[in-house]
Amino acid sequence: MPNVDRYLSLVTSQHQNKPKFKAWLSAPLSMLESCSEAAENLYAHFDLDTAAGAQLDTIGQIVGVDRVVDFQPGDGSSPKLDDENYRVILKARIIKNQWKGTLPELYDIWETLFTNAFIVLQDNQDMTIDALIIGLFTDLQRDLITNGYIIPKPLGVEINYIYSENPFFSYGLSNRDFKGYGEGYWTQYV
């Protein structure tokens, strides 16, 4: 950002005491300073993590995602998304556009979008993938995932979603998301 006083201090001694010259030099420098401040503020207004309302709508137009989803959410809420959920599908769409189609990348995408949920992906080798999802989700987030707004998939591949708020049953593994006998739960397809 240009500082007018800094540039005026660079004026040679011959013109230091000339008020008209300093005024002439200050005019374009102050305009340049205003433009520079506007450009710096533009980034802050359209940062995906801090943008809200109309700013998110503008980002959505650029990315190609509408705020209104093409299904009626199961919880009876409006298909017009609030800022928090809209921000998640915007991030998901940006990541989808850069996805190379590998399963390890899907884990990275998931960790970027949902930090407190866990996903296990299994390629069934028959053009289907099982996605086991553990964690606290709202019904709207489940609907967004099930309707393909979050997890990218290759054309022709079907994803079977399995949701659980309880830890999955597993042999020999015990952590927050997987438990053994008496604590783990069996899953079912959605």
Image (cartoon, rainbow, N blue to C red):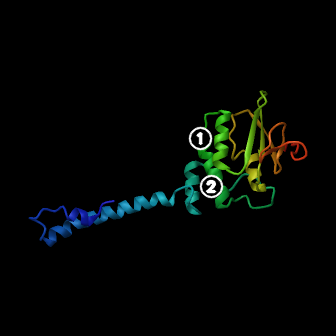
Residue 55 lies in what quarter of the image? bottom right
**Mark drawn on residue 87:** 2
Q: Position of residue 49 (x, y in %)?
A: 57, 56
Please tell me which of labels 2 and 1 falls first in the chain: 2
Q: Amino acid at mark 2?
A: Arg
Of the pair 100 and 109, the residue shown nearer to us: 109
Circles 2 and 1 in contact, beta carbons < 8 Å: no
User: Is residue 103 shown left or right of residue 77?
Assistant: left
Q: Secondary structure at mark 2?
A: helix
- Spatial CA span between label 2 and label 1: 16 Å
Residue 187 lies in what quarter of the image? top right
Specify whether residue 147 is in view: no
Q: Which quadrant does the C terminus fall into?
A: top right
Disc 2 packing (10 Å; few <14; some 14–19; many ≥20)? many
Q: Residue at x 67, y 40 (%)?
A: 107
User: Is residue 18 shown left or right of residue 6?
Assistant: left
Specify whether residue 132 is in view: yes
Residue 96 lies in what quarter of the image? top right
**Mark drawn on residue 97:** 1
Q: Amino acid at mark 1?
A: Asn
Q: Position of residue 25 (x, y in %)?
A: 20, 65
Q: Secondary structure at mark 1?
A: helix
Q: Position of residue 89 (x, y in %)?
A: 65, 51
Find the residue positioned furthest to the left. 14
Answer above or below: position of 130 versus 136: above
User: Is residue 131 shown left or right of residue 95?
Assistant: right
Q: Residue at x 78, y 55 (%)?
A: 139
Q: Position of residue 185 (x, y in %)?
A: 88, 45
